[in-house]
Image (spheres, grey):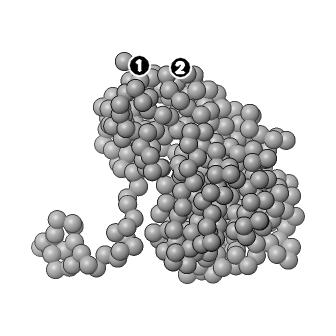
C-alpha cells in the first residue's frame, strides 16, 4: 500500500522543515526544464542543449573499453591516474608554458569541470566571502554561493559580454577572494584577448585576489580569436591562477564527467581534500580513455562549428543584436526591443513553433536575450534560425 503524500511530494508524516535552507535557496536549472520539455515534444528543433553532436574519438572509446576489460574499475588515487596527470602536464607545458608541478604547482583530475568549480568554491569561500562572476554567467556560477555560503557578485558585461579588468574592478570589495572568468563563454561565446587577460591578471595580483579561469571550451576557439594558433588564456601570464579545463565538451563525452584543475599547490591540495570526502575520484575508465585525447585532431570539428557560427550571425544580421561568438557553440541573442517581449515570453512563442532555446534570465539578472546552441546539424540549425528570424520580422 502506497503512502499518502503532501502537495510538495513528501510523505504525509514528514515535515517540509526537513529540507535545508540551502536546498530551498537553489532553483532547479532552467536549462533542465527545457530539456524535460524537449523529451515530451514530437520532433522539436532543439537549439537549447550544450551537447556536442559528434562522436567520442575512437581511440578514447577503445582505451576506456580496454580499461573496463582489464578490470581497472575500482577507485583510483584521488589526484587521478599518473598517466592522465602526466598527459595533462605535458599539454599545459606546450599550451601555456607550465613545465610540470614544480614546488608550488599541482594538478588534480576532477569529476567534470563542475566538480572542480564546486570544490574550489568550498576550498576558498567562508560565509560572506565574495567571488566576482560574469553576468551573463554559466548557470552553476550563481548557485555556488548558495551551496557554500559565499556571495557571488555579478559583473555586468552587457552589451558586448566582455569581462574586462575595468568592469571587474568596480565589483571588488574587501570581501572579494576570487574572480571567476569563463572564456570561451557559456552562454555568449565570447573569447577574451591576451591583452584583456593580461590586464585581469595584473588587477587580481594588485588586489590580492585569486583568478579562476574556466576554460572548458578552450579547444572551441575560432580562427578570428586564436592568438598564435591557440585560445588566449591568463595562464600564459601567470601560474598564480586556478586553471580549470575539461574533456566532456571538447571530445563529446560529457557523460564521462571528467575535467582537471591546476594551479597553486596550497589551493589544489585543499580541493583534493574535499574530493576525498565527496567524489573520491573521477570515473576510472573515463580517466584511461582521456589519456588518448591529447593526440586527437579537433580542427575539422572546430572548423565545422565555425561555419555554423556564421549561419547564426547571418540569420540575425539586420534584425537584432548578436555579438559575434568567437568560441564555444553558443550565441546570446537579444530579443528586439521593438517586439516588447522578455526573453521568457519570446522563447514561449518559439516553443509553440517547435524551436527550443533557453531564456536569458536563466543566465543573467536580465531577461532581454536568449541562448542559442549551434551544436546541431546544419540543416536543422538553418530551419530553426529561419523560424526565429521570421518571429522577429513578422
Numbered circle sitting on residue 260: none
Query: Looking at the image, is mark 1 or mark 2 earlier in the sequence?
Result: 2
Splitting the image into 4 quarters, where does residue 158 fall? Answer: top right
Q: Position of residue 360 (x, y in %)?
A: 45, 43
In this rendering, position of residue 229 left or right of residue 6: right
- Which residue, given by chain and number where applicable, does mark 2 sit on? 318
Q: Secondary structure at mark 2?
A: loop
**Picture residue at 37% right of the left edge, 27% below the top:** 339
Q: Secondary structure at mark 1?
A: helix
Q: CA distance from mark 1 to mark 2?
A: 10 Å
Quadrant occupied by the N terminus: bottom left
| 259 horizontally vs 33: left or right | right
Q: Residues within 10 Å of mark 1 (few under 14, many from 20)?
A: few
- Residue positioned 77% across, 65% down in the render: 205
Image quarter of residue 97: bottom right
**x%, y% of residue 328?**
62, 42
Q: Position of residue 198 (x, y in %)?
A: 79, 53
Residue underneath mark 1? 393
Image quadrant assignment for residue 292: bottom right
Q: Nearer the viewer, residue 104 or 109?
A: 104
Amino acid at each position: 500500500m502506497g503512502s499518502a503524500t503532501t502537495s510538495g511530494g513528501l510523505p504525509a508524516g514528514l515535515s517540509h522543515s526537513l529540507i535545508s535552507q540551502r536546498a530551498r535557496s537553489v532553483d532547479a536549472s532552467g536549462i533542465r526544464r527545457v530539456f524535460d520539455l524537449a523529451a515530451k515534444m514530437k520532433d522539436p528543433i532543439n537549439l537549447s542543449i550544450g551537447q556536442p553532436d559528434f562522436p567520442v574519438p575512437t581511440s578514447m572509446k577503445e582505451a576506456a573499453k580496454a580499461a573496463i576489460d582489464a578490470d581497472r574499475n575500482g577507485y583510483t588515487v584521488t589526484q587521478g591516474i599518473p598517466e592522465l596527470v602526466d598527459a595533462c602536464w605535458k599539454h599545459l607545458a606546450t599550451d601555456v608554458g607550465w613545465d610540470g608541478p614544480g614546488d608550488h604547482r599541482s594538478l588534480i583530475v576532477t569529476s567534470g569541470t563542475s566538480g572542480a568549480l564546486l570544490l574550489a568554491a568550498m576550498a576558498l569561500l567562508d560565509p560572506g566571502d565574495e567571488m566576482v562572476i560574469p553576468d551573463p554567467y554559466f548557470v552553476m556560477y550563481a548557485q555556488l554561493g548558495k551551496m557554500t555560503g559565499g556571495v557571488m557578485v555579478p559583473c555586468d558585461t552587457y552589451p558586448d559580454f566582455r569581462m574586462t579588468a575595468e568592469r571587474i574592478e568596480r565589483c571588488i570589495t574587501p570581501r572579494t577572494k576570487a574572480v571567476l572568468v569563463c572564456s570561451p563563454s557559456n552562454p555568449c561565446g565570447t573569447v577574451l584577448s591576451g591583452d584583456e587577460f593580461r590586464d585581469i591578471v595584473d588587477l587580481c595580483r594588485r588586489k590580492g585576489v585569486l583568478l579562476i579561469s574556466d576554460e572548458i571550451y578552450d579547444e572551441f576557439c575560432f580562427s578570428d580569436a586564436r592568438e598564435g594558433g591557440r585560445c588566449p588564456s591568463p595562464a600564459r601570464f601567470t601560474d598564480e591562477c586556478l586553471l580549470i579545463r575539461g574533456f566532456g565538451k571538447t571530445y563529446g563525452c560529457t557523460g564521462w564527467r571528467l575535467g582537471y584543475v591546476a594551479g597553486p599547490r596550497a589551493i589544489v591540495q585543499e580541493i583534493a581534500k574535499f574530493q576525498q570526502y565527496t567524489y573520491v575520484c573521477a570515473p576510472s575508465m573515463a580517466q584511461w580513455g582521456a589519456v588518448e585525447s591529447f593526440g586527437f585532431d579537433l580542427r575539422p570539428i572546430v572548423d565545422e562549428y565555425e561555419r555554423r557560427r556564421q549561419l547564426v550571425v547571418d540569420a540575425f544580421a539586420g534584425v537584432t543584436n548578436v555579438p559575434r561568438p568567437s568560441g564555444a557553440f553558443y550565441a546570446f541573442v537579444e530579443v528586439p526591443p521593438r517586439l516588447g517581449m522578455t526573453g521568457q515570453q519570446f522563447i514561449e512563442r518559439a516553443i509553440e513553433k517547435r524551436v527550443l532555446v533557453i531564456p536569458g534570465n536563466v543566465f543573467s539578472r536580465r531577461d532581454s536575450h536568449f541562448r542559442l546552441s549551434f551544436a546541431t546539424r546544419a540543416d536543422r540549425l538553418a530551419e530553426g534560425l529561419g523560424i526565429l528570424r521570421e518571429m522577429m520580422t513578422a
